[in-house]
Image (cartoon, rainbow, N blue to C red):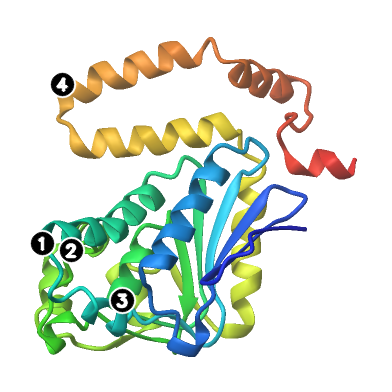
Amino acid sequence: MSSLGPFETIQVDVDARGVATLTLDRPEVRNAMNGQMYDEARSVLRRLDNDPEVRVLVLTNAGDTFCAGGDFKYQQSQAGKPREERIREAQKLARWLRELDTFPKLVIGRINGSAYAGGIGLVSTCDIAFGLTDASFAITEARIGMIPGMISPYVVRRIGEANARRLFLNATPFKGTEAEGYGLLTKAVAKSELGEAVEREIDLALRCAPRAVTEIKRLIRYVDRHDFEENFIYTVDRVADMWEWEEAAEGMQSFFEKRAPRWDWRNKGA
C-alpha cells in the first residue's frame, strides 16, 4: 500500500492490485467540502487517471458521515466577492463532479455513513455505490434557502425527474434502504457487510480488461445521449475498431486456452 500526499482534506492510497482509495478526511466537520478539498481531489484524479497501474477508484470517508455537503463557512466567504470570482469558485465543484463522472476507470462508492446535499452529488457520480441501510440522506438545499445547482445533473440522471421533484423540493429525509429504491445506491447493506460488498465488486472489476472498461464507460455515456441513427453508426464503428485491439485478441485467445487473461489480477498470485 502506498500513499499519495500529504493532503489536508483527503487521504489517498493505492494498493498492490491497483485499487486507489480516495477518502474524504474532514470528519470534524462531517467531511463538508470546501475549495481546498476540490483542488486536492481534482489534482489526485489527474494523477490516478494518468497512472496505468490504477484500475479502480474507491470513494469513501473518514468518520461517521460520508459528506454533509458544502462547508457553510466556505460558502459564506463567497458573499461579497466579485461575481467572476464566485463563478470561478463554483466551477471547482462542478469540474470535480464532471471529472469523477467521466473518470475512465471504475468508480465504486463506499458510502460509510450519511450523506446530504453536495454529498449526494458525489454518490451520484459513482459507477457503483454501496451505502448503509440505516444511514440518513437528504437533499437539503431548499430548507436553507439554496439550490442544488452543480449536483443536479448527476442526481437527476441517477434517480429520475419524478424522484428528484420528490426529494429536492421539500428536502425530505430518507434512509439507505429508500436510497436503494430511488436508485441512488446500488445496494444498501449493514455496516458489517459494507467492506465485503465493495471487495466483491473490486474482485470482479480486476478481472476485466482496463481498456475495455474505459471504452465501455464512453460507450454508455454516448448511447445515453444520442438517438438510434447516431448510435447505429457509433456502435458499429467501435466494434470494428475493437476487433483490432490487443486486449480483444488476448481475451479471445485466453478463452480458447481456458486460462485467465493477462490483466486478471489473480495472475499475480499464480
Viewer-side label of 2, 3: 2
Report how far apart the C-alphas of labels 2 and 1 lie in the structure.
5 Å
The residue that appears at 45% across and 30% down in the rendered structure is 215
Q: Is residue 267 above or below residue 253?
A: below
Report how far apart the C-alphas of labels 2 and 4 lie in the structure.
41 Å
Mark on residue 70? 3
Viewer-side label of 1, 3: 1
Residue 200 lies in quadrant:
bottom right
Q: Can you identify the residue that label 1 sits on?
A: 83
Q: Position of residue 197 (x, y in %)?
A: 60, 68
Q: Can you identify the residue that label 4 sits on?
A: 229
Badge 1 marks a residue whose secondary structure is helix
Report how far apart the C-alphas of labels 3 and 4 lie in the structure.
41 Å
Q: Amino acid at mark 2?
A: Arg
Disc with the residue nearer the chain's start (2 vs 3):
3
Residue 122 lies in quadrant:
bottom left
**Other residues around mark 4 within 10 Å, as few (<14) / some (14–19) / many (≥20):** few
Q: Is residue 13 above or below residue 207?
A: below
Q: Position of residue 171 (x, y in %)?
A: 17, 85
Q: Can you identify the residue that label 2 sits on?
A: 86
* Of the pair 229 and 209, the residue shown nearer to us: 209
Badge 3 marks a residue whose secondary structure is loop
